[in-house]
Amino acid sequence: MTPMKKLFLSLSAAALLNVASAQAALPTGSQAPDFQLQGALAGKPLTFSLKQALQKGPVVLYFFPAAFSKGCTIEAHAFAEATDDFKKLGATVIGVTAGNTEQVDAFSKEECRDKFTVAADPGAKVAAQYDTLMEMKGKTLSDRTSYVIAPDGKILLSYTDRNPETHIQKTMDAVKQYAKSHS
């Protein structure tokens, strides 16, 4: 095999792996795994239960790599600004991270502006159930993936993109569509 062909094959394999990882999140229509995690709202510790939250309406579940990192702070600010609009539509917002889990209390207060719960996912166990893992600097973290989950536990939206800018609009559109079809 020529060196050029080897290079082409290795680049093709790498491209396929990137496509596979970008589409690894649980698909729309599948059942969302139930979970309970320790977290905080407005800096106060709590236990978040997906099952309990779904009894109130749809849940916007977003995974992010690490508290206080640039992209995660941008995303937290945007979700904080949109939380009241999500609540008006009957939806609960929760952010989950497998990175620097010891900082979720402070992150919920400072960057999430006391608006929504942030939960710690030590060892990325829940992120693994949702097929949204990534490796960064030798650590397994939750990838930037947003889900909208209907009260029956079905996933209405599954969206992975490292850019934090589009997650709020995608999740809001899905919640609005759910609310419109269930009014």
Image: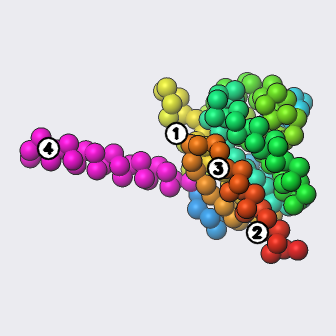
Which residue is found at the position 28% from the left and 50% from the top? 12
Q: Is residue 40 left or right of residue 7?
A: right
Q: Which residue is mark 4?
A: 4
Front: mark 3 or 2: 3
Residue 126 x, y percent position in the rendering: 66, 44
Residue 58 x, y percent position in the rendering: 81, 60
Q: Is residue 23 magenta?
A: yes
Q: Amino acid at mark 2?
A: Gln
Residue 107 x, y percent position in the rendering: 78, 29
**Against 103, is 182 above or below?**
below
Q: Amino acid at mark 1?
A: Met
Q: Which residue is mark 1?
A: 134
Distance from Cα at disc 2 to Cα at disc 1: 30 Å
- The reply to whether discs 1 and 4 touch (Cβ–Cβ < 8 Å) is no
Distance from Cα at disc 4 to Cα at disc 2: 49 Å
Q: Which residue is mark 3?
A: 166
Q: Which mark is residue 60?
A: none
**Against 118, is 150 above or below?**
below
The type of colouring in the image is: rainbow
Which residue is found at the position 84% from the left and 47% from the top? 83
Distance from Cα at disc 3 to Cα at disc 4: 38 Å
Q: Earlier in the sequence, mark 3 or mark 2?
A: 3
Q: Earlier in the sequence, mark 2 or mark 1?
A: 1
Q: Which residues are magenta?
A: 1-25
Q: Earlier in the sequence, mark 1 or mark 4?
A: 4
